[in-house]
Amino acid sequence: MSKKFFARTLRAAAAAALCLSIAAPTAFSQAGVTPSVKPAGNQDAAKDAPKQAATDERAEAVLRRAVDALGGGAYLGVRSMVSRGYFTPFTEGVGGLPVTFLDYLVFPDRERTEFKGRGVSSIQTNTGETGWLFEGKTKKISDATPEQVRDFRISMRTSLDNVLRGWWRTEGAALSYVGRREAGLARRNEVVRLTYADGFVVEFEFGAKDNLPGKARYKKEAAAGGETIEEEDRYAQFQLLGGVRVPFIIDHYRAGVQSSRVNYQEVEFNRAVPDSLFSKPAVSKALK
């Protein structure tokens, strides 16, 4: 089977960072408040109903142009992705040894990422408000911690798919236009902002000329009640695949220093992904 090349969305990069205990994707926000985590289950159907989202027509226009630049209907028609590539952690801006990953992503909130490298393997799986992990070295399967679930929620809020597909509307976030921002020599980005009711803010930058995604910026608490750090994801090497334009590389920065790189090498769109991949196995042997 011939290889197909693709760059996964921001959410997959976040899962990779979670699994390897590397910082999740970065971005800058005006309010450094960590989003709250809803309890699992549906205790009150009325509370789960979509909320009215506040929007700014200038910001909406920026998003429409970005969707068109990424492929329009072809981009919006993607419902699942299976991808392979390399994840490279950085220490003080210096790249380390890359590990391979295999990622299964089903919109809007199911993801399983498998890693192999350095003689070990691991799996990070998230489904909405729940998740589980497998550590190959110890053969241990465990539930995701509240902090890991929180980080996954942050990764969803800061993903390109969230802002471009309008999932933020169900949380009642407000969309606003920030203006233009310098983005290099003779380059400027259009900036839009999502502001959530709990105070979490994420800004997305899109090229003023090509309308392609440039950055996602926000602030995240390093630990509960701890220091707030500016985080940023940068998208590069856009290529056209099946009518969809995607970035081959996602670089992550924490406090202005690169902390990881995701480099995609193979992808399939809308491939059937069995539900069993996201179910927590009773024993590690079931993962083979």
Image: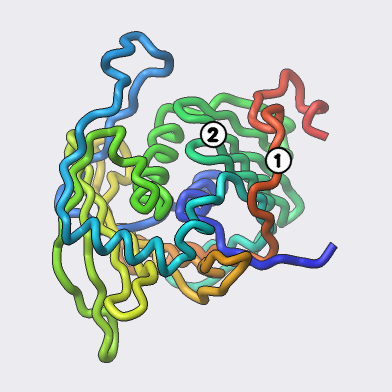
Read off the residue under disc 2: 126
- Identify which residue is drawn at 48% across, 57% down: 73
Residue 114 at what x, y percent from top left? 67, 45
Q: Is residue 68 left or right of residue 219?
A: right
Residue 156, located in which quarter of the rendered image?
top left
Q: Secondary structure at mark 1?
A: loop
Residue 121 in the figure: left or right of residue 51: right
The answer to whether residue 154 is above or below residue 206 is above
Q: Quadrant of residue 99?
A: bottom right
Upstream in the sequence, badge 1 or badge 2?
2
Q: Residue at x 76, y 52 (%)?
A: 119
Q: Which residue in the rendered view is the most extreme toward the bottom?
A: 186
**Which residue carries the number 1 mark?**
272
What is the distance, in whole Å, between disc 1 and disc 2 at their CAs? 18 Å
**Which quadrant of the figure contains the N terminus?**
bottom right
Please determine whether, in this image, residue 280 is positioned above or below residue 158.
Answer: above
**Picture coordinates of residue 31 (x, y %)?**
16, 48
* Residue 75 location (% of width, % of height): 50, 57
Coordinates of residue 43 in the picture (x, y in percent): 35, 9
Residues 116 and 49: in front is: 49
